[in-house]
Image: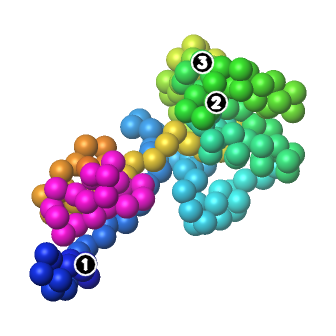
Amino acid sequence: QKLLIDSDGKIHTYDVLIMATGSKATMLKDAPQLQGIFTMRNRVDADKFKQHIDPSKGKVIIIGGGLLGIELAASLHEVQIEVTIIQRISRLMDRQLDSLGSQLLHEVLTDKGIQIYYNDEVERFLGRETIDGIRLKSGVIIDCQAIIIAVGTVPNIERAREAGLTCNRGVLVDEYLQTNDPSVYAIGEVAE
């Protein structure tokens, strides 16, 4: 309930709704339904990946050079799994680091043996039932045992739209996190 004290000192209460519906991992539009292609958003995703992976069966490709992709690459490297990162733009963690920071991170990762392809993206996924590799737009073919897609998240705004709330990428809010409906507030990853 929301409390309001009017100019006469009377206390009024009314109900409010707080939307905190979170987000889901972004999946590439043309990603096929093959075993061995993962997103990493929750424990279930991590458990499925862990059951699939075999350190002796080759590399893991991480699509996305943001925070999640870098953390996954470093963690996999620590358990002796070969890793390749595919980054669509010219540097790593472009939202968090400036050019120099990104270059230093690149050097740390490549010194560990993590291969990074910049300014490239997946043109084709290879495999019939299970992922075997990818072909990049540059023509490079990379074999793998698994792919993790770490290209961001999408806010869960479906119910907000159905309820008539104003949405762009997320639910639009003001500086108080109030939506266009004065009794509805949106917080967290769903708020814009």
Q: Earlier in the sequence, mark 1 or mark 2?
A: 1
Against 61, residue 140 (above or below) is above
- Decide if residue 47 is on the left or right side of residue 58: left
For the residue labelled by badge 2, is the local secondary structure a helix, a strand or a loop?
loop
For the residue labelled by badge 1, is the local secondary structure a helix, a strand or a loop?
strand
Neighbourhood count class around disc 3 (C-alpha, 10 Å): few under 14, some 14–19, many 20 upward: few
Label 3 sits on residue:
90
Residue 188: say if magenta.
yes
- Decide if residue 177 is on the left or right side of residue 41: left
Percent position of residue 186, x then y: 31, 61
Label 1 sits on residue:
2
- Extent of the magenta region: 173-192
Kind of residue at disc 2: Leu
Q: Looking at the rendered structure, which numbered label has been put on residue 54?
A: none
Q: Are marks 1 and 2 in contact (CB under 8 Å)?
A: no
Kind of residue at disc 1: Lys
Counting labels gives: 3
- 41, 93: nearer the viewer: 93
Residue 51 visible in image: yes
Looking at the image, which residue is at 39% across and 48% down?
154
SS majority, magenta: loop
Label 2 sits on residue:
97
Against 69, residue 20 (above or below) is below
Q: Residue most toward the front?
A: 8
Kind of residue at disc 3: Ser
Looking at the image, which residue is at 27% across and 51% down?
174
Q: Earlier in the sequence, mark 1 or mark 3?
A: 1
